[in-house]
Structures are given as structure tokens and as C-alpha cells.
Amino acid sequence: MRSRPAIAATLLGAILAVVGYLVYLGGLVPVPLAEGRDRFVLANQEFGEEALRLEALMPAGEGLDAFLAAQSDLTLIEQAPDGGWVGQLISGLQTSRHGRRWRITVRPGWRMQDGSTLDAARIGTVLRPEVGRLGGGLRVIDPMTLEFRFKSRKDDLPRFLASWRVPGSGPFIRKGNTLVRFDRFLHGRAGVAGLTVLTDLALMESRAWAEGLASARWAWAVFPGHMAPEDMAKVRLAPYDEIRMKDGSVWFLSRRMRRLRPKAEDWTRTRLFGAWKGAMDLPYDPLGM
């Protein structure tokens, strides 16, 4: 029969083992984040092009609103083509082994459009309702560190961090359907001075739409769907490329905008930063189109 000290020692060892295991599960491990700076490629402007204010023609709706928001309000991280994660407003991401605790490190020196600098408290104010909808809470640890806690595993939290936006953090200031360049953006000047998206249905009519492209008025214009043959003939001679999106829409994109590369699978996530392409970057065109 074992002595009382031996039993006590065994119980103490078991308790310490359990506590140690729980501490191990609660410990934080880093989630790899690639550097996001190369996602903002500066345009190669010719003289005067930095002052350009472009116009585009698109139907109104949720898609357009999401596209404009993506230019003015950035997400904490974004997904890379290879499936990994790229840091955007944050430089570090950690999670516990039990998946219920997450911690983010704010990218230092990120200038906001209102003149302030991004910090953990600002992000916390924006994300608190979103985190609450997932059944979690958040805590500001220090000016650059924010922690999320959940009652159950949240292995898919990065997917939410890539969709939650922080207002006023992007390279363009949004005013309705107009974007104006924010010159103090951390990764440099965005190139064009601004973009206005028109949604007037009258401009989508066959003759008006064709004349707009023939005069090269639009940076890009979404195909309205119905065109008179004589109007379509004018469009075929205009300096635009046709790009088909997976939602069925067709963009007529100015050849001076080839750097834009709209995302066919989800054009609302297309980045306007650095989109204008100088004439010297274009393929030689003997017809001057």
C-alpha cells in the first residue's frame, strides 16, 4: 500500500502535468505573413499624368460599392494567389494551439486619412462588433497589440481578418462615387489623382456608350448588354481591350489601363493603386490607338 506522501506526490505531478498541458495549448505560435509592400506597385507616369482624374462607367450596386470601399478602406491581411496570407495593416499574427486566442501586431507608422496613426485601439473600435458576432471579445494589450478571445476554436479567423475593413486606411479618399488620391499613404503615391465612377443609365444607352468609348472618355466601361450594330462597329475601333468577368459582365478597359488587371473572379477586389500605364510602357501601336 502506497504511503500518503507518495499519493500526494502523484496527485501533484498529475495536476502539474494538466496545468502544463493547458499552458502549452494556450501558448501563441506565429502565423506566417508575407510582406505586403510589393502588393502596391508604383506606376511609371509620364509628365503630368500624376494629375490625371479618370472617369469610368459602371452600373450602380453592391459590387461597385465594394470596389470603391476596397480603394479607401484596407483589410488587416489579404490572401495571396498561392493561398498564403499577406500582412497589410498588421505585421504580425499569432494564434494559440487550442485556436481560441489570436493576437495581431499593428504595422507601425501607418498613416490614416484623418491625419492620425493607426493603432490597436482604433482597430479594436472598428472590429468589436464583428468579433462579437462570432461570439468573441477583444482586448487592447498595448498601443500596437490587440488580442481576440473566443469560447471555441476559430481556425478560420484569418478569412475574417481579410474581409474586415478599417475606414480611412487606404490610398484613396472616398467621397460618394469619387476617389481622390491620399498623398500620405505609407507605400507611396497611387499615381492618378482621382477617379469618378458614373452610373447614369442614359450613358449606358447604345449611342452614348459607343461615343464615350470612341472618344476614349472612359478609363473603363462595362458593356451595357444591347448595342446597335453601327454603334458596335465604332467600339471595335476604339483603344480598349475586352475583359470578361466570371459574373458575366464584360469590361472594356482602356489600353492605357493595362496595369490595372481587374480580377476576373471577383472584380470588386481589384486594386486601383498604380494602375495608370505610361505610353512608353505600352506595346508599339502604329495606328496610335
Image: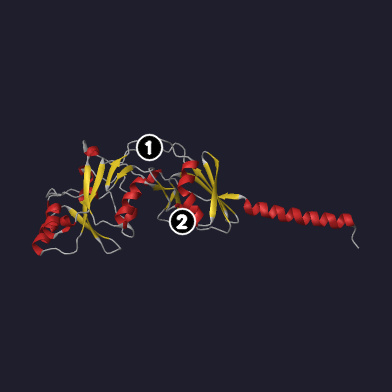
- Vertical arrangement, residue 266 with respect to residue 115, above or below: below
Q: Position of residue 199 (x, y in %)?
A: 22, 54
Residue 167 vs residue 45: left or right?
Answer: right
Q: Nearer the viewer, residue 175 or 246?
A: 175
Circle 2 residues within 10 Å: few <14, some 14–19, many ≥20: few
Find residue 268 and name its label.
none
- The residue sitting at 49% across, 49% down in the picture is 128
Q: Position of residue 202 (x, y in %)?
A: 15, 56
- The residue sitting at 88% across, 54% down in the picture is 5
Quadrant containing the N terminus in the rendered view: bottom right
Q: Earlier in the sequence, mark 2 or mark 1?
A: 1
User: Residue flagged by tag 2: what amino acid is it?
Assistant: Arg
Q: CA distance from mark 2 to mark 1?
A: 27 Å
Circle 1 residues within 10 Å: few <14, some 14–19, many ≥20: few
Q: Position of residue 277 (x, y in %)?
A: 24, 45
Give the secondary structure at mark 1.
Answer: loop
Name the mark nearer the viewer: 2 or 1.
Answer: 1
- Vertical arrangement, residue 89 with respect to residue 237, above or below: above
Q: Is residue 11 visible?
A: yes
Q: How many marks?
A: 2
Q: Which residue is mark 1?
A: 114
- The residue sitting at 24% across, 47% down in the picture is 196
Cβ–Cβ under 8 Å for marks 2 and 1: no
Give the secondary structure at mark 2.
Answer: helix
Residue 220 vs residue 115: left or right?
Answer: left
User: Residue flagged by tag 1: what amino acid is it?
Assistant: Asp
Looking at the image, the residue that sits furthest to the left is 230
Q: Nearer the viewer, residue 57 or 3?
A: 57
Q: Position of residue 257 (x, y in %)?
A: 24, 49
Q: Which residue is mark 2?
A: 159
